[in-house]
Image (cartoon, rainbow, N blue to C red):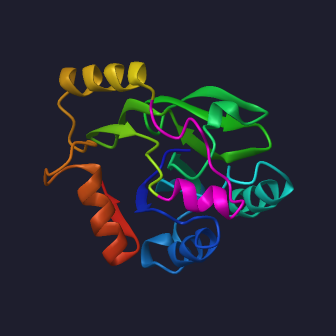
Amino acid sequence: MSIKYWYLTGDTHGSGLLPRLYNVKTMPEVGAIPSTIGVIILGDVGLNYYLDDRDKKMKKKVNALGFQIYCVRGNHEARPQEVEGMYEIYDKNVKGWVYCEETYPNIKYFKDFGAYQIFRYKVGVIGGAYSVDKEYRLLNGWQWFPNEQLSFSEQDKCYDLFMENDFDFTGKYHEENDIVSFLKLVKENDLFLIRT
């Protein structure tokens, strides 16, 4: 089923994920069928952090809501392609390749960098980041992912992708129409709605 409404949020770190998704259910537009609602979570989602049954339990709850969830990988989570059972599929709602798990078909993960289309908007996605809190995390026994950042080779390919495309929304810094600006907006307003 095609998505009619898109919501953006980010930095949910697992514990903030369900409350934000429940907020989506209370919005007036959500009289629609849940599968026609897409939610993009911009980094540190919290679904691939523990890499054990705790993640599976959360994924089961999120998947059951019926929304189509699209995740941009942050620095505090594993790369989706490294999660057991993950595979690539072409997704017509974003007109691009994403990762998915058979058990949780409503949850998809954008590639670490790529070009997608949401409604009429061409969107560039960049996942991962450097953890400024790396040493603190390691000292406290918290999860840290050695490949949290794009490699130099990936950065070069990502740079080429962004130079070759004119994105409506991109990961370029200090521009009004970039994902960073969206992140600021999302953090101020919690959820942001894109309508056709």
Q: Residue at x 40, y 71 (%)?
A: 191
Name the residue at the right extreme: 53
Left or right, 72 with respect to 52, comes to left
Q: Position of residue 131 (x, y in %)?
A: 48, 52
Tell me if residue 144 is in the magenta stretch: yes
**Where is residue 84 drawn, in percent x and y?**
78, 34
Rendered location of residue 9, percent (x, y): 44, 64
Residue 158, above or below 68: above
Question: Relative to the observer, which residue lies in front, 180 or 63?
Answer: 180
Residue range (magenta): 133-150
Q: In which quadrant is the N terminus drawn?
A: top right
Quarter of image, res 63: bottom right
Above-or-below relation of 63 to 123: below
- Residue under the image location 69 percent in, 61 percent down: 62
Q: Is residue 84 visible?
A: yes
Q: Nearer the viewer, residue 174 or 196?
A: 174
Callout count = 0
